[in-house]
Image (cartoon, rainbow, N blue to C red):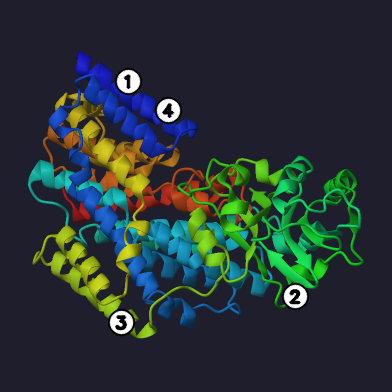
């Protein structure tokens, strides 16, 4: 091995190790590796930031914006409003929701498709009185499967098409993935709907977090001659934090002030509205010489006109709050919102919640000012777990949004226009027709993914240029020496699937696609079957909650544990291999 190869293999091993560890976010890890590679001379300075202008990076960003436009126009809800029915049987519901999710994720970002359908699925499960854990994992798997069928359905397909263009001079087109990816998706959906959901552990109906909240809401009144009289409410925050109490608001003369009461001066007879466990509440009352009110405001959460509402949100990997605490984020004083509880893999955290570091997949129970729940959720970067009023344009623009997007897909599919240009024109049209406000465009781009792609693409190119991918390919060829081609493809698929199950699927595709091309060159056959093998395998991450963002998103709401995923995921991956390899050899012959 050359010095450059040793350095690059060391960098990739470090990147994969850091991604598996999960201590630092993947975009920081990848960007740091890129800078180190440039500094050590294994990545040319002129190519250092070429990945940020790469077609794959641009397409991923544009697809996210177009997906947001389709949602904002109300186009997606034209489907869900009419098709979802809580009276259907469990198998039929999973088949229907899975089908909708798969179709949506074929043409929009699959994380966005899950985010749209997850509240619908949760609400349907609650109406039907069944555990939401029986349906959320199938929905997650379905949205992952659907992305395999088209070029824009998932980032690995976009990356592989771009790598093919650079290597062979022509990219895969929009529906080139459909014969293999579509068949794999159909077979996977059938398995999930008929058999797969039966393999999920049934832990019963998860308790609604908001149902147990009333006992944690109370009022403490300020008696005459109290030492707290004359102080600002904010001056009590330190004592409240010590006792694990949150001051929600102030009641004076029957008028309630929530959120904005921090600077109010305390007067005799005022009542502080607090969120606290009973023992913490008593500790705080004793420390400040306060009195209990005549009633414990247990009706606070549901009474009309309170000015407060309780919401449940799930934390994605890239949320503002991920890896931070509510106290460190300043949730209370920035957004007038109190974190009241955290649900993590079915376990309820109610003590020191504001000092607990929040993880991806957690469900947060928030008490926020009424009519501000959407703003608070968006500020946190979280996803709501209940259907709520969405800030969408008039419904008559739904068909316009669909028509513009459909025209762009058709034009790109027949080769009339380059796909990134077509998607860019859709974004411009959405802005001009006021489907998507221009101020919101950049909010819908998943910048960590853009940084990951922009950083990993130059590193992947450097590995190929240095001969590193050839070394990996030759090792796999030697491992499968004497085996038929279908067995070689199977080994490549299994290796890629394994990487994708524990690493980011985007990073997996960037490394595995050039290896597949080199294997084909060594065997003197067409590289297309190998690229298709990598495309399917990179997206088939079903064994763990960390292999795909969708699996992470349903971890908390479904009450799953880490080991629950392989029960349905392992036979699903075996099925995908069994269906995909013959399909690849038929539709993409050697």
Q: Is 432 positioned to the left or the right of 303 in the image? A: left
- Residue 295: image quadrant is bottom right
Residue 483: horizontal and vertical position, in percent?
Answer: 26, 33
**Residue drawn 57% across the image and 63% down it:** 385
The residue that label 3 is drawn on is 399
The residue that label 4 is drawn on is 17
Q: Which residue reaches farthest bottom?
A: 396
Which numbered disc, 3 or 1, marks the residue that appears first in the sequence?
1
The circle drawn on residue 10 is 1
Spatial separation of the CA atoms under disc 3 and disc 1: 51 Å
Residue 333: horizontal and vertical position, in percent?
Answer: 60, 52
Spatial separation of the CA atoms under disc 2 and disc 1: 60 Å
Mark nearest the camera among 3 and 1 is 3
The circle drawn on residue 386 is none
Which numbered disc, 2 or 1, marks the residue that appears first in the sequence?
1
Q: How busy is the neighbourhood of tag 1: few (under 14 within 10 Å), some, or many (20 plus)?
A: few
Which numbered disc, 4 or 1, marks the residue that appears first in the sequence?
1
Q: Nearer the viewer, residue 367 or 211?
A: 367
- Residue 179: image quadrant is bottom left
Q: Helix, strand or loop at disc 2?
A: loop
**Residue drawn 16% across the image and 24% down it:** 466
Q: Helix, strand or loop at disc 1?
A: helix
């Amino acid at each position: 091995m050359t010095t450059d190869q040793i350095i690059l293999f060391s960098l990739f091993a470090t990147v994969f190790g850091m991604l598996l560890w999960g201590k630092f976010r993947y975009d920081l890890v990848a960007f740091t590796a890129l800078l180190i590679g440039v500094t050590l001379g294994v990545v040319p300075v002129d190519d250092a930031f070429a990945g940020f202008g790469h077609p794959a990076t641009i397409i991923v960003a544009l697809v996210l914006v177009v997906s947001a436009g389709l949602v904002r126009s109300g186009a997606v809800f034209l489907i869900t409003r009419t098709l979802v029915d809580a009276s259907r049987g469990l198998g039929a519901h999973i088949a229907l929701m899975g089908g909708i999710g798969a179709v949506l994720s074929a043409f929009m970002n699959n994380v966005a498709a899950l985010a749209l359908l997850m509240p619908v699925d949760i609400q349907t499960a609650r109406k039907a009185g069944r555990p939401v854990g029986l349906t959320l994992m199938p929905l997650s798997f379905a949205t992952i499967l659907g992305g395999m069928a088209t070029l824009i359905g998932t980032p690995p397909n976009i990356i592989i098409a771009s790598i093919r263009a650079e290597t062979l001079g022509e990219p895969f087109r929009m529906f080139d993935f459909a014969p293999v990816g579509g068949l794999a998706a159909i077979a996977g959906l059938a398995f999930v709907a008929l058999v797969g959901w039966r393999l999920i552990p049934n832990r019963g109906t998860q308790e609604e977090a908001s149902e147990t909240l009333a006992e944690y809401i109370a009022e403490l009144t300020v008696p005459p001659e109290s030492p707290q009289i004359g102080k600002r409410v904010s001056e009590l925050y330190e004592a409240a934090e010590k006792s694990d109490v949150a001051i929600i608001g102030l009641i004076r003369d029957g008028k309630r002030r929530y959120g904005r009461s921090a600077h109010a001066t305390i007067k005799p007879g005022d009542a502080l509205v607090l969120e606290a466990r009973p023992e913490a509440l008593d500790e705080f009352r004793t420390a400040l010489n306060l009195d209990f009110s005549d009633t414990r405001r247990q009706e606070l959460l549901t009474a009309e006109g309170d000015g407060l509402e309780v919401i449940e949100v799930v934390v994605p990997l890239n949320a503002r709050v991920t890896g931070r605490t509510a106290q460190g984020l300043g949730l209370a004083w920035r957004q007038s919102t109190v974190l009241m509880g955290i649900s993590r893999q079915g376990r309820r955290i109610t003590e020191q919640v504001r000092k607990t570091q929040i993880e991806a997949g957690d469900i947060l129970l928030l008490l926020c000012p009424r009519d501000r729940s959407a703003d608070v959720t968006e500020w946190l970067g979280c996803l709501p777990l209940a259907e709520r009023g969405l800030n969408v344009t008039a419904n008559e623009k739904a068909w316009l949004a669909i028509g513009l997007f459909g025209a762009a897909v058709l034009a790109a599919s027949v080769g009339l226009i380059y796909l990134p240009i077509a998607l860019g024109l859709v974004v411009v049209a959405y802005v001009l027709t006021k489907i998507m406000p221009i101020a919101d465009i950049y909010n819908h781009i998943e910048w960590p993914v853009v940084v990951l792609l922009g950083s990993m693409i130059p590193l992947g190119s450097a590995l190929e240029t240095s001969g590193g991918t050839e070394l990996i390919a030759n090792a796999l060829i030697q491992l499968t020496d004497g085996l038929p081609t279908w067995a070689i493809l199977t080994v490549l698929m299994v290796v890629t699937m394994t990487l994708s199950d524990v690493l980011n699927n985007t990073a997996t595709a960037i490394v595995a696609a050039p290896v597949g091309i080199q294997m084909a060159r060594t065997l003197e056959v067409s590289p297309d079957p190998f690229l298709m093998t990598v495309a399917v395998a990179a997206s088939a991450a079903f064994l763990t909650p960390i292999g795909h963002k969708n699996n992470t998103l349903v971890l908390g709401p479904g009450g799953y544990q880490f080991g629950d995923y392989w029960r349905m995921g392992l036979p699903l991956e075996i099925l995908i291999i069994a269906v995909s390899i013959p399909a690849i050899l038929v539709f993409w012959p050697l």
